[in-house]
């Protein structure tokens, strides 16, 4: 596994954390850091490390295996990219897309630490009825 790059805001060493049985994220939890950035939750340790180390890349994708499209029942996945909102504020757009019928829903957040929360809210709102 790759070595983790230091936090871009405080230069301290980040930590790889496990969430549940199969999800991982990398983040800075230093008391000296005012931002405490964190990656979106990934299915593998390697994926979380790659997202942290390649944070300069504008897009990230993650499969969500337990979410099905409410229209066709196909598999849903998220796509996260940096963007500007309608007033020009820098942030991230989180898109939930269906692999089969190509339907999608989007939400914007200006805070990187809110990406997992927004992502889970999108899944909750958009999931198939009866799940």
Image (tube, rainbow, N blue to C red):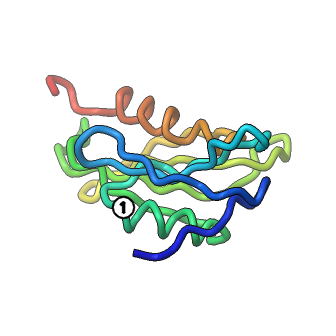
Q: Say which quarter of the image contains residue 120.
A: top left
**Residue farthest to the bottom?**
2
Q: Is residue 5 left or right of residue 33?
A: left
- What residue sits right under mark 1 in the picture? 45
Residue drawn at x 35%, y 28% is: 124
Compared to residue 51, the image places residue 35 above or below, namely above
**Quarter of the figure with the C terminus:** top left
Q: Say which quarter of the image contains residue 31.
A: top right
Q: Is residue 45 left or right of residue 75?
A: right
Residue drawn at x 24%, y 58% is: 100
Whether residue 76 is visible, yes or no, is yes
Image coordinates for residue 79, horizontal then vertical, percent: 47, 56
**Residue farthest to the top?**
130
Compared to residue 90, the image places residue 71 above or below, namely above
Residue drawn at x 72%, y 47% is: 91
Whether residue 102 is visible, yes or no, is no
Image coordinates for residue 82, horizontal then vertical, percent: 67, 57
Q: Secondary structure at mark 1?
A: helix
**Quarter of the figure with the N terminus:** bottom left
Image coordinates for residue 14, horizontal then vertical, percent: 59, 55
């Amino acid at each position: 596994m790759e070595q983790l790059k230091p936090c871009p805001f405080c230069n301290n060493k980040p930590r790889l954390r496990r969430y549940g049985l199969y999800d991982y994220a990398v983040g800075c939890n230093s008391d000296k850091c005012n931002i405490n950035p964190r990656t979106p939750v990934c299915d593998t340790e390697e994926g979380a490390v790659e997202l942290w180390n390649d944070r300069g890349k504008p897009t990230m994708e993650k499969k969500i295996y337990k979410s099905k499209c409410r229209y066709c029942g196909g598999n849903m996945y998220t796509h996260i990219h940096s963007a500007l909102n309608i007033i020009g504020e820098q942030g991230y757009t989180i898109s939930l897309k269906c692999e089969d019928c190509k339907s999608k829903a989007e939400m914007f957040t200006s805070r990187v630490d809110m990406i997992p929360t927004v992502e889970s809210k999108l899944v909750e709102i958009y999931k198939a009825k009866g799940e």
